[in-house]
Image (tube, helix red, strand yellow):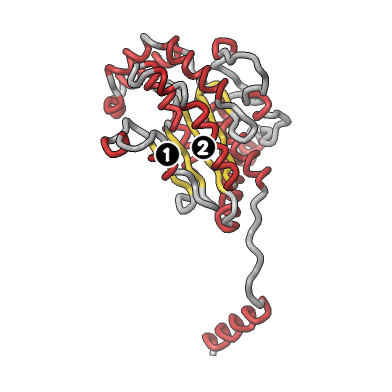
Amino acid sequence: MSTDDAQNEQPTWDLDPKFDFIDAHRLPFLDDKVSLKKIDTECSGPFEGKAHGKAFTQAANDEIRDLQYRMFTEGKQSLLVVLQAPDAAGKDGLIRKVLGQMNPQGCRTYPFKVPSSEERSHDFLWRIHKAAPAAGKVSVFNRSHYEDVLVVRVEDLVPKSVWKERYQIINDFEKLLAHRGTRILKFYLHISPHEQLERFKKRLDDPTKHWKLNAGDYAARDKWDAYREAYEDAMEKCHSKIAPWHVIPADKKWYRDASVAAIVRETLRDMDPQLPPLDADLDEIRGLYERELSEMNE
């Protein structure tokens, strides 16, 4: 088979499918109680398969980088991406394959781990607010302020009288960010217990992933229902048009990446950042350039 024949056999996937990823995965704005049990953890969307989804993600990433550059140079708007998920759902992989593809000059990831003694001596949003994106920037939260109504609740780290007041505080905080010009996207990577266990096995079998092994992950599985209920309450109480929750089917890694890339791209398109106007005399600058070029060639 010639090279031309091989190239002609390459699939011609639709990289702009008529599929509304936001509508498919954003929680509805209804009074109904959120039920993660009713939401599938596996999805293929409009894609013919893994290779199609990966090709779409690459194309979406290219546009995301361009839009992020425009937002950075515009210096007026900002974007906050919040990632929450059970362990092994793929927050790190999603950051590496999609969100981390943005220019690091204008994008930074914040992994929120167990609070330090200094952080515990302040209010629970102190360390979070410092990481909120400045104008023109993107912040990605790998875990976030929602840990303070999730882990602290399930593990009984603070009394209920403390964490139940935090939902409204979080809503007010997100309103403050939105008022300043920050668009907020919140993603829950929805993985099944079976798929999580499969990924735990891969960590066991791969020595390069042994650093991820943690006995506490199995203890958390024993509290799967309690964590699901805590997530459902957080989504129900802190879901708004200015800071919506998206539940992303995450059993297929490639679909997880493609759907988040699509939603981030569509959000940046809607923000429509503009390159700043030229603050100089273009004819003068062109004349200076031509003079320098002429002098160099003499």
Q: Position of residue 112 (x, y in %)?
A: 37, 34
Amino acid type of the residue tagged 2 in the rendering:
Phe
83 lies above or below 285: above
**160 or 241, nearer to the observer:** 160
The residue that appears at 52% across and 85% down in the rendered structure is 296
**223 or 153, nearer to the observer:** 153
Q: Position of residue 171 (x, y in %)?
A: 54, 32
242 lies above or below 167: below
Residue under pointer 2? 173
User: How many labels sit on residues?
Assistant: 2
Q: Position of residue 223 (x, y in %)?
A: 38, 11
Res 5 quadrant in image? top right
The residue that appears at 55% across and 10% down in the rendered structure is 37
Mark 2 / mark 1, whichever is N-terminal = 1
- What crowding class fits label 1: few (fewer than 14 Cα within 10 Å), some (14-19), or many (20 or more)? some
The residue that appears at 44% across and 9% down in the rendered structure is 225
Residue under pointer 1? 128
- Secondary structure, mark 2, is helix
